[in-house]
Image (cartoon, rainbow, N blue to C red):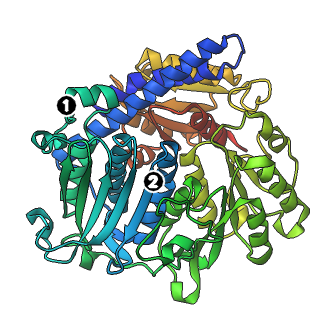
Amino acid sequence: MSHELRTPLNSLLILAQLLAQNPTRNLTAKQVEYAGIIHSAGSDLLQLINDILDLSKVEAGKMDLTVETVSLARLLDYVEATFRPLTSQKSLSFVVRTSPEVPSELVTDDYRLRQVLRNLLSNAVKFTEQGGVELRIEPADEDRVPELARRGGGPVLAFRVTDTGIGIAPQHLESVFGAFQQADGTTSRKYGGTGLGLSISREIAYLLGGAITAESTLGKGSTFTLYLPIARPDSADAVTTRTQRELQDAGASDPDVRGAGREPEPAATTLSALPGPLRRRRLLVVEARPGGLLSLVAENAVGDLPRYGDPAAGDGVEIITAVGAQEAAATLATNPCHCVILDLDLPDGAAASLLEEMERDPSLQGVPVLAHSSRGTAAPDTRPLRERNGSGLLELITGLDELRERIVLHMGADRPGDVLPLVHRPDTGSPWDPDLDRSLAGRTALVVDDDDRNLYAITGILELHGMRVLQAENGRAALEALALHPGIDVILMDVMMPEMDGYTATAAIRAMPEHSGLPIIAVTAKAMIGDREKSLASGASDYITKPVDADELIGRVKRQLAP
């Protein structure tokens, strides 16, 4: 069903994105707005599909957990960074409190715990128009812990999410945990939503060894409590506790109140140590606020690095977060860094100014800079970056997945020069402006897919960049096309196709000596655990999931065709 649901959505999102970018400037402003709405609605549908698949995996017993040591301080930083902007937009207070008795670390699945808290807090914000939202973390009262959360026999924490919203009538309190359910039809129509969040959250809580309860008074607000064991049952012995991270966030030192309706004071650095292959290496993240999105991506990427080395001896990776360009410059002056992640959306052109300072400093000219912009690289204020000819290793990146992969490559290499740059010079353009970006012009791509809509959508992206595109409807037709057109530069290979699937076709191509090095990118709606490994094992050079992001697709094609 992942394949059947995502395949039509793939072409919808790609073509809507192409229209919204209006590369030929022949659409009216209203038509561009319509395309943007289509893309936004398609993205909402994708989120619904992801929720349904999550629920299906839980009910089928196929949801795998990654149990690890979770820093409570980092979890709260994530909560602050995610929900303070949302509450500020609605003029709500937002308070996060932790009891002094709460331990600094938990043993659980970090990603799934965040998913549950995200669902509970999102609901609290959505259904609250006045007042505020509070998250309080404290040791659970033994008399109130549900039986489901007592399975491990160990201590249990209570994560209480309280709001001053519309509340829930007593007769509807239990029904809100049912799939596709909200309190009543009127609520559903007014506030929207699928009613899957609480259902998924309760199932995940059970998998984590805990439980969720609800208390509410109609018209006065609600309290949803996640009871979670400090160590997931049967997991404490199997998990090696990570080295305690040194936290220097101003809010983390207060054990009782984090926030209290105010913005957290900016912290100069947030240090995170993990074992690594070399002596301690530094990754500097420069963004507008502490604990932002790029910091979360960096932490996630560093967490995937091989965990070896002796942290006590100074091995590993250290993530340093600088708030703004001025603080970043001061950090670089005192702490040599292996790699820099830079938010191009810093206000007042601060990102470009920082790059100019780095270029003037001979000691920083060889430091790789991974520059990310959420607005894409076609924005007018990124033109100086695209045209820059400095000696630094600047890479312009728009996709978070691509950013994460580049972090892993740079921080896992023995030397910066060991990593092939995404581009040897800054991009000369944007995927949406063929007049600026002609690096793929004249190259030939073979697109293999049994869905005509996907063939049309992906062909449109590639042709926009001046590529010649050949098409095949299955693996067998792809082999025939390859025999007739030996000059093919790259293949985009769907996986699930009739007659001959993508795995078999890829393996057959790799068996031909003349095509052993031909780049093959697996493009598939299969996004389950093990699919990436199966594609790469069959001989694919890279892997991308549907719905395909146009920027990410072009970035991967460029990477495969780089010298």
Q: Which mark is residue 452?
A: none
Identify which amino acid the numbered label 1 is placed on: Asp
Say above or below: 548 vs 354: above
Say above or below: 343 vs 543: below
* Disc 2 residue crowd, few under 14, some 14–19, many 20+, Cα 10 Å: some
Q: Nearer the viewer, residue 256 or 25?
A: 256
Q: Position of residue 115 (x, y in %)?
A: 35, 52
Kindly identify which residue carries mark 1. Answer: 184
Q: Residue furthest bottom?
A: 313
Identify which amino acid the numbered label 2 is placed on: Ser
* Disc 1 residue crowd, few under 14, some 14–19, many 20+, Cα 10 Å: few
Q: Position of residue 392 (x, y in %)?
A: 81, 57
Q: Position of residue 485 (x, y in %)?
A: 60, 21
Number of numbered discs visible in the structure rendering: 2
The C terminus: image quadrant: top right
Q: Residue at x 58, y 18 (%)?
A: 33
- Give the Cα distance between marks 1 and 2: 27 Å
**Rendered image quadrant of residue 43:** top left
Q: Which mark is residue 93?
A: 2
Q: Is residue 108 left or right of residue 74?
A: left
Q: Disc 2 on helix, strand or loop?
A: strand
